[in-house]
Image (spheres, rainbow, N blue to C red):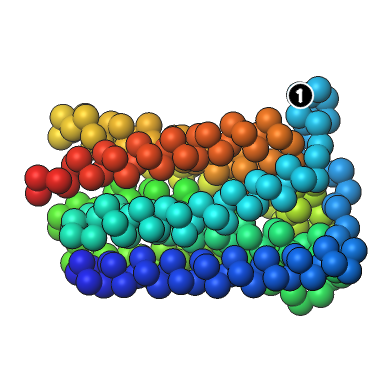
Amino acid sequence: MTLKLRNNLILLLFAVSLCCILVAAAIFLVAVAQHAITPPPAHRIPAFLNHLAFARYHFVATMLSITVLVLYVPTTLFVMYRAFENTQTSEIIFFSGFLISCLCEGSRILLPLFGLGASFSQLQFFCGRILLIGRILAPLSLLAAAILSDIDQRQDIERNFMILIAVSTMFALVIPLNTTEFTSSCTIHWGFSRLITIVKTFFALTAILSFLFGGLRHDSKELKMVALAATFLLFGYQLLAISDNFVFLAVGTAFLVSGTYLLLLNLHKLYMWK
């Protein structure tokens, strides 16, 4: 993917993320004005959170965690554009997939509004599918950044990126949604949840280990730090994805921000002299 196409993709995602944020904010404000916000039932996943005194359920924390993930997207895209405008980095393309997954989390903010979470409507199903696409895309995009960013793969960046989106979408379309479970983190649950968790964990661990082994193979301190950054990113993202309390909100935000800083800093160092 040429620099021009890469930069255009970043700008496009930046514009799309701003539009999504504005639309979601407008709908939320209308719901506030009409007193049409219904907090989800305190059905917590994982259930052991109910027994942790420091992790008490707060609906406000859930909404703030979604807001952090959504606002994180245009902020990071802006930094990426400024820092890598003239730098040929394949990893940045696939990291854009991770940002798309964070933007997908914004669909959760609609579920407590106007009774959508209990409506069994097509919009409810659509929000559930969008969220599932993001949950699969997050670890998969970092895995692709680790294994598909070599020089011999750069001619196929566009194809590989589209395959990444297509695979995530395909999985999200065939996995059944369990609309009877509306969790405390404003998430519509889905079938085969344990299997999906195992697959996501496998993708995440493989991505981290691929970066680490790449750093060891090339004796690259930067790639080793990218492995640490990927660990922070995925851990912070997952905490914010299930966050329904202020502790998870604070810790998840800290890991997400620090992971992003480490990733972009070390990728910039890695390609600075190339």
Q: How many marks?
A: 1
- Classify mark 1: helix, strand or loop: helix
- Name the residue type under label 1: Phe
For the N terminus, which image quadrant? bottom left
Identify which residue is drawn at 19% across, 69% down.
2
* In the rendered image, the vertical position of residue 172 relative to residue 46, given as above or below: below
Q: Residue furthest front?
A: 33
Expressed as whole percent of the image width and height from the top left, the position of residue 162 reads: 38, 70
Q: Residue furthest left?
A: 273
**Does 73 sit left or right of 80 as displayed?**
right
Question: Is residue 94 at least partly visible in the picture?
Answer: no
Q: Residues within 10 Å of mark 1 (few under 14, many from 20)?
A: few
**Does 141 sit left or right of 2 as displayed?**
right
Identify which residue is drawn at 44% across, 66% down.
14
Q: Quadrant of residue 26?
A: bottom right
Of residue 75 and residue 5, the one placed in the foreground of this image is 75
Expressed as whole percent of the image width and height from the top left, the position of residue 76 reads: 42, 53
Q: Quadrant of residue 107?
A: bottom right
Q: Which residue in the structure is indicated by mark 1? A: 54
Q: Residue furthest top?
A: 53
Identify which residue is drawn at 50% across, 40% down.
256
**Does 213 sit left or right of 239 as displayed?**
left
Expressed as whole percent of the image width and height from the top left, the position of residue 247 reads: 68, 30
Identify which residue is drawn at 45% across, 54% down.
75
**Does 104 sit left or right of 264 as displayed?**
right
Question: Is residue 267 at least partly visible in the picture?
Answer: yes
Of residue 158 and residue 192, the one placed in the foreground of this image is 158
